[in-house]
Image (cartoon, grey):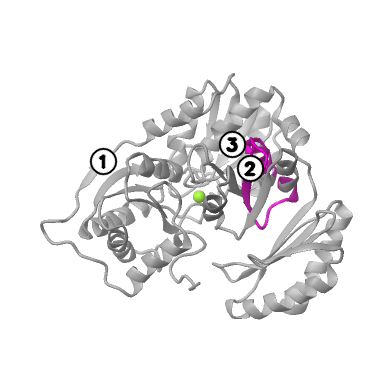
Amino acid sequence: MRVKELFGTRGIRGPVATKVTPELMLRLGMALASHVDGGKVVVARDARTSSEMLCHAFIAGVLAGGCNVVDIGLAPSPCLAFTTRELSASAGAIITASHNPPPDNGIAFYRDDGMEFTDEDELALEELVLKKAPKRATWDSLGSVERYNAIPPYIEAIKKAVKVRRGFKVVVDCANGVASLVTPILLRELGCKVVTMNSHLDGHFPGRPAEPQPWNLGDLMRTVREVGADVGMAHDGDGDRIAVVDEQGNFIKHDALLALFAARAVRRKGDVVVTSINTSVAIEEVVAKAGGKTVRTALGDFHVAMLEHGAVFAGEPGKLVFKEFGPWADGVFTAAKLLELMSIERKPLSEIISFSVPDYPMYSQDFACPDEKKVEFMRSVRSYLLDHVGDVRDVLEIDGIRVNRRNGSWLLIRVSGTEPKARMVLEGRTAEEAEELKEIGLKAIKKFLGC
Ligand code: MG
C-alpha cells in the first residue's frame, strides 16, 4: 500500500503554524466534497484556539465543492460520528488534534455510518489534495450551511441504550475539551452526583495536558479520594478517549478496562473481539473464558478489522468501540456503560476489576529512531528477537514484531508510523519474567539503535 504523506495513523495532526493551515483546510474541504460527490457533510470542532478559524476554511471548501454542510459547532468526535449516521450524511469531519499540545490542530473524517475513514479513504482524499484538482461547483450549485444542535439527541440516544440502576458519585475531568459539553450533563441525567474538574472550554488546556494518561491525572486521583467518589473519569480533548480511576483513586490500566468490556460484549460462542497489537494477553484470556475469540490488528486499524470479522467489540488503549451503539470510539458512551456495569455488579470498581481481569506486569518505553533507519532496524530486531526470546508460541508481524511465549508473556518492538520513534512493549507472567524480557529488548535496541 502507498505511504500516506498528509495523514498520520488516523486523521491529520500537526502545528497550526506550519502544517494544519487554513489553506490546507480549504483544499481538504473541496477534496472531501469531490470524494463523497454530493449530499451533506456534518462538521464539528473542538475547543482549541485555532479550531474556529480552521473550521470556517474547511466549510468554505466543502461549499465550494458543491456539498451542503450541517454545522454542529463545538462537539465531541463521537457525537459527530453519531450525528453523521443519524442525519444520513455523506461524511462527517471534526477539526481536532485530540490530545496533542495546544499549538497543534488537525482533522478527522468519518464515513456515512460513523466509522472513521480507512487508509483507503484517506489515500483517496490525499490524492485529491496533493495531485488532482478537486471539483469546483458552479455559482448556481454551491452548497449551503445549516446549523444543528446535535448534543441533545446524542445524550438521549445514550440514555436509551444504557440502564444505570442506581446513582453514583462521579468525578469527571474533561481536560477543558468538548466532552465538557456532554459527559457531566449525561451523567447527571443518569442520576449521578457529578463533581467536575477542567470542565469549562479552554483551548490553552490550563488544567492538564489533554492525553488521559496516569501521569496527567494526579488531580483527578486525589479528588476522587477527597470527595469519596465511586469512580473518576477523564477524557482527551475531543472525547473519543476515556481513562478511569477507581474509588480508591487508583488508575485503572487501559488494558484492564478493555478486557472488562470485551469479555462482557461476548454473548455467543465464537463472538469476535478486536484489539491492537500492543495490548495485554489478559484480553485474550477473559474473552476466551467468555467463549469468544480475539483478533489483533495494527495500531489504528481496529475499525476496519471490526467490520471484516463482524466483531462485537473493538478497542485500543483508551479508545473503546461498542458495536451495539456505533462503529466509532466513544469515551462518552463508555462512561455510561461503565456506570451501568457498576450498577449491575454492586461492588466497588476496584473489586470488579481485580475479580474480572488478571493483572500481569507490563512495561513500555520509547526510543528515538530516525525514519531512514526504521526498515533496517526492524529487520535486525526481528532476527535478534527470534534468536533470544525463547519458548516461542507464535510471532505476530502485522505492526512491528510481537513474539508470544507459550506461557502467554510477550515482547513487542515496533516503529511509529507518524514520529521518528521506536517503541518496546512487553508483558511477563511475573515481575522477574518482565525484567528478563525487558533486558532482551533493551539489548536489541542498544545493538541496533545505539541507545
Ligand atoms: Mg481523541
Task: Label 2, secondary structure: give it.
Answer: loop
Q: Tell me the residue that label 3 is attached to.
A: 233
Q: Position of residue 348 (x, y in %)?
A: 71, 26
Report the side of 313 relative to 349 (left or right). Answer: left
- The residue nearer to you, when weighing 156 against 314, is 314
Mark 2 Cα-neighbour bin, 10 Å: few <14, some 14–19, many ≥20: many
**What residue sits 60% from the left and 32% below the top?**
338
- Residue 179 inside the magenta-drawn segment: no
| Front residue of this view, candidates 89 and 338 | 89
Residue 450 seen from this side: no
Q: Which numbered disc flags the more N-terminal residue, 3 or 1?
A: 1
Query: Which dot marks residue 219?
Result: none
- Label 1 belongs to which residue? 147
Which numbered disc flags the more N-terminal residue, 3 or 2? 3
Q: Residue furthest right?
A: 432
Secondary structure under the numbered disc 1 in the rendered image:
strand
Looking at the rendering, the stretch of residues picked out in magenta corresponds to: 256-283
User: Which picture quadrant has residue 20?
Assistant: bottom left
Q: Which residue is mark 2?
A: 271
Specify the amino acid type for callout 1: Arg
In space, the residues marked 3 and 1 are separated at their CA atoms by 30 Å
> Is residue 259 part of the magenta span, yes or no?
yes
